[in-house]
Amino acid sequence: MTHTATDWLAAGSLGLTAISLIALALSFADADATYFNPRWQLARLVESGHIERLLITVGPALAAARSAVLDTAALLLMLTTIPTGDLR
């Protein structure tokens, strides 16, 4: 069953209404520029040691994935290339 233009307009109207209500609610909230500054959260994350553990875990996995991609590309190149001349 395909949706009609009326269905799409109704969904768009509902989405626009929801976003407008959220914007209206946020316009009455007290906000300071420090609320939107993530530096202290990032500093706390770095000090906790989570970043080092993540890099220790992810670093070798990325190197292995890169190596696997290069090996696969080399294998596909060898399998799809027709040798010419003395290489036959």
Image: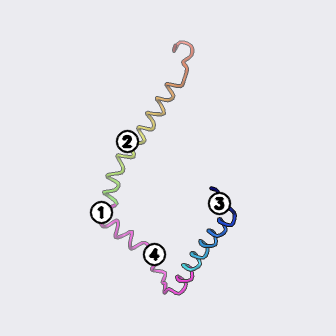
Mark 3 or mark 2, earlier in chain: 3
In this rendering, the label closer to the viewer, 1 or 2: 2
Marker disc for residue 14: none
- Asked whether 81 or 25 is in front, the reply is 25
Residue 75 placement, left or right of 10: left
Q: Alpha carbon of mark 4 to alpha carbon of mark 1: how far? A: 21 Å
The x and y percentages for residue 65 are 40, 42
Image quarter of the N terminus? bottom right
* Residue 41 sits inside the magenta stretch: yes
- Looking at the image, residue 44 lies above or below residue 25: above
> Which of the marked residues, 2 or 4, is nearer the chain's N terminus?
4
Distance from disc 2 to disc 4, alpha carbons, whole Å, reads 36 Å
Closer to the chain start, of discs 3 and 4, is 3
Amino acid residing under circle 1: Gly
Q: Which residues are magenta?
A: 23-50
User: The residue under label 4 is which amino acid type?
Assistant: Asn
- Report the residue marked by disc 4: 37
Q: Residue at x 64, y 70 (%)?
A: 10
| Element marked by disc 3 | loop
Horizontally, residue 82 falls left or right of residue 35, namely right
* Residue at point 42%, 72% (across, down): 39
Q: Which mark is residue 64?
A: 2
Q: Which mark is residue 3?
A: 3
Marks 3,2: beta carbons within 8 A: no
Q: Quadrant of residue 15?
A: bottom right
Q: Residue furthest front?
A: 1
Q: Which disc number belongs to residue 49?
A: 1
